[in-house]
Amino acid sequence: TLEAGFDPDLYIRRKGKDAYAGALKNSQRYFDYLIERARIQFPVRSAEAKVKAVNYLLPHIQRVPSRIVRDELSQEIAQKLGIDSAVLRQELKHAVANRSSAALKAPVEVQATDAERILIRALTSATEMQTAETHLSARDGAEEQFDPARQARFVLQNERLHEGLATEPLVEALLHSGSNIADVLEIPLSDPDRRLLASILMKEEEEQTAERLDGAVRALRRIGLRRKLEQVQRELQATRGKDAAKLQALLTEKIRIKRALMDPGLVEESGPTQPHGEVS
C-alpha cells in the first residue's frame, strides 16, 4: 500500500517512477495486508471471530482465477488466523476451491452437557496422549500414559451412560468407528451430529486430564440415576392399587436409586471390573 493520501498517479507525479517502483518492491503483499486488516477488525480469540475474519477475506480470495493459488491462500489464512478446527479448515478449503459465494457459518451450538462434551472430546483424541500426573503400573512399575480415548471408550461401552441423551447417535458413531481413528471427520454422520462434533472440537482450549474425565463420568452416572428415578416414579403412579408385588419391587428400586444418588462416588458395585488405569 502507498502512503496515505496517494494513489498511483499522484505518487508518480509527486515522487517519480523510480520511487513508485521502489515502493511497489518493498510494499506489503496484498493478501498479507487483507489478512492483517481482518485480524484487526475481528480479533481472532474465538471461533465466531475467526469465522467473521474468514468471511471478510473470502470474496477477495474467490476473485483469484487460479485454484492452486486459492488453495495456498486458504492454507495461509488458516495458519495466520490460528484456525485449528479441522471442520472450519475443511469448510474454508471447500469454499475457496469451488469459489462458492456462500459465507461460512460457525457450527451451531447444541444442548449438550459439559460432561458429554468432555467424553466426546476424549473419544476423538486417540492420538492425543496427555499426562495429567504420573501413573504407575502395578505390574511392572513402568510409567503408564493417560489415554483419554481408551478410558472413555471402556466406560461408555460397559455402562452405556450416553443412552437416551442428545449425544447418543454421535457417541455411538465414535464407538463403532474403532479406537484408531485417522480423521473423525471421515466418520459417516448426520448433519446435526456433524455440527455437534464441530462445536465440540472448536473448543480446544481445555486440557484433557484424568480428573476432568473422571468428573464427566460421575456426572453422567448422576444424570442416568436421576432419569431412572423419574422412570420409577412414573411406573409407581401407574401401578398403585393394581399389582402389589410390582409395587413393592418399584419401591425397593426407588430406595436403591436414592441411596446411590447420595453416594459421592456413584460407583456401581455390580459394574464391570475396570482395567488398570481406568477411571472409576
Image (cartoon, rainbow, N blue to C red):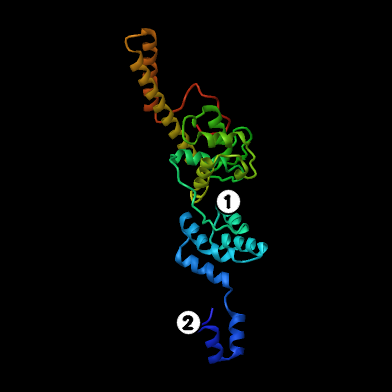
Residue in the picture at 63% in, 58% down: 97
The image quadrant of residue 241 is top left
The answer to whether residue 258 of the structure is visible from this angle is: yes
The answer to whether residue 265 of the structure is visible from this angle is: no
Disc 1 marks a residue whose amino acid type is Ala
Q: Position of residue 161 (x, y in %)?
A: 49, 30
The residue singled out by tag 2 in the image is 4
Q: Is residue 167 above or below residue 47?
A: above
The residue singled out by tag 1 in the image is 86
The image quadrant of residue 80 is bottom right
Along the horizontal axis of the image, is 217 left or right of 60? left
Counting residues from the start of the chain, the first of labels 1 and 2 encountered is 2
Badge 1, how many Cα within 10 Å: few under 14, some, many 20+?
Answer: some
Q: Is residue 130 above or below residue 172?
A: below
Residue in the picture at 63% in, 45% down: 183
Cα–Cα span, label 1 and label 2: 39 Å
Q: Residue furthest left?
A: 241
Along the horizontal axis of the image, is 5 left or right of 91? left
Q: SS class of the residue under badge 2?
A: loop
Q: SS class of the residue under badge 1?
A: helix
Residue in the picture at 60% in, 36% down: 137
